[in-house]
Image (tube, rainbow, N blue to C red):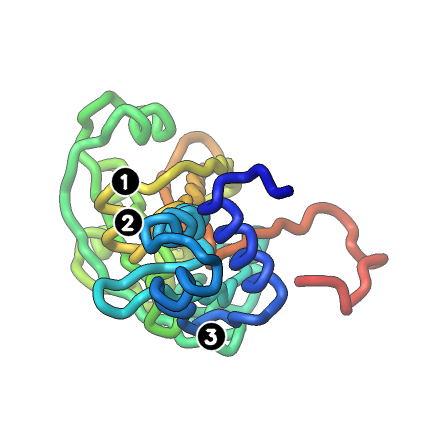
């Protein structure tokens, strides 16, 4: 005899069917009324089971439209190649990588003068509340919100690289632009973390309940000091990152990329 609460039985059964392909990504689940009949349970019990799946990020709910299995068309980012100037690039690294994957990139920009918070100031080794140029990108892959990217440049960099403070894109990418005017980034330090989204992040990335964000902070250094701090916030359900380290000649081309 199954001693689990009825709503968990509902959730477990539907989860198995979603995982087994009975309800593929993008399809709608039966109505609460239909599920009540199937499981011989009240609508409140069924709703509790469905809400478990919502909190796990497996399904989404829309007012008046019922429940739909979430699509997980994952985009894979090779962080070793990202911004690496030895690799061919047509425009900025984001546009190049998304286009190379056979998908369509779009993005919006916001450029402003701001004050460094403690997190950014620590990484750029400047005083807290120092003046920064912030370049903020809201990025999409095939019209689906993919990430936000906030890049902070200290005042000395902005003074030597005035295009950073101009609105709109830097066509060749900011890393190449800086390198061409003599501010070459000799190395990067990456930090990766995960957490639940803030309300603003949830709104910008269209994140449903139960879906975390992946935070990637990259601090770029010249030979003697930090140049910029970039904080990229990804939807955790639609993104995967990888790195290539060392000699990978033994790695099969058929292995997951």
Residue placed most toward the observer, 110 or 4: 4
Find the distance from the CA under tag 3 to the CA under tag 2. 25 Å
Residue 72 horizontal/vertical position (percent): 49, 64
Which of labels 3 and 1 is toward the front?
Answer: 1
Q: Are marks 2 and 1 in contact (CB under 8 Å)?
A: yes
Residue 233 is at least partly visible in this image:
no
Label 1 element class: loop
- Residue hosting label 1: 198
Circle 1 residues within 10 Å: few <14, some 14–19, many ≥20: few
Label 3 element class: helix
Residue placed most toward the observer, 218 or 45: 45
106 left or right of 26 in image: left
Q: Which mark is residue 202?
A: 2
Residue 186 horizontal/vertical position (percent): 51, 42
Find the distance from the CA under tag 2 to the CA under tag 1. 6 Å
Label 2 element class: helix
Using the rendered view, name the quadrant where residue 120 is placed: top left
Q: Earlier in the sequence, mark 3 or mark 2?
A: 3
Q: Residue at the location (34% across, 65% down)?
A: 33
């Amino acid at each position: 005899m199954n001693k689990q609460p009825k709503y968990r039985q509902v959730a477990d059964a539907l989860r198995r069917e979603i995982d087994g392909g009975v309800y593929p990504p993008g399809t709608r689940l039966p109505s609460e009324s239909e599920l009540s009949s199937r499981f011989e349970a009240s609508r409140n019990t069924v709703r509790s089971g469905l809400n478990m799946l919502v909190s796990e990020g497996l399904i989404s709910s829309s007012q008046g439209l019922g429940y739909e299995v979430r699509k997980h068309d994952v985009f894979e980012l090779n962080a070793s190649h990202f911004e690496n100037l030895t690799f061919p690039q047509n425009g900025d690294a984001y546009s190049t990588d998304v286009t190379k994957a056979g998908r369509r990139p779009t993005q919006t920009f916001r450029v402003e003068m701001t004050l460094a918070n403690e997190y950014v100031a620590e990484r750029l080794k400047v005083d807290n509340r120092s003046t920064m140029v912030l370049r903020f990108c809201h990025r999409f892959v095939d019209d689906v919100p993919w990430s936000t990217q906030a890049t902070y440049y200290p005042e000395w960099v902005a003074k030597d690289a005035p295009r950073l403070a101009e609105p709109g894109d830097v066509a060749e990418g900011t890393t190449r632009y800086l390198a061409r005017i003599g501010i070459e980034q000799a190395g990067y330090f990456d930090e990766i973390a995960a957490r639940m989204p803030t309300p603003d992040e949830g709104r910008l990335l269209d994140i449903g309940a139960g879906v975390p964000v992946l935070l990637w902070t990259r601090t770029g250094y010249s030979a003697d000091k930090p140049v910029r701090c970039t904080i990229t916030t990804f939807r955790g359900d639609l993104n995967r990152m990888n790195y290539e380290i060392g000699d990978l000649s033994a790695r099969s081309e058929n292995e997951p990329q």
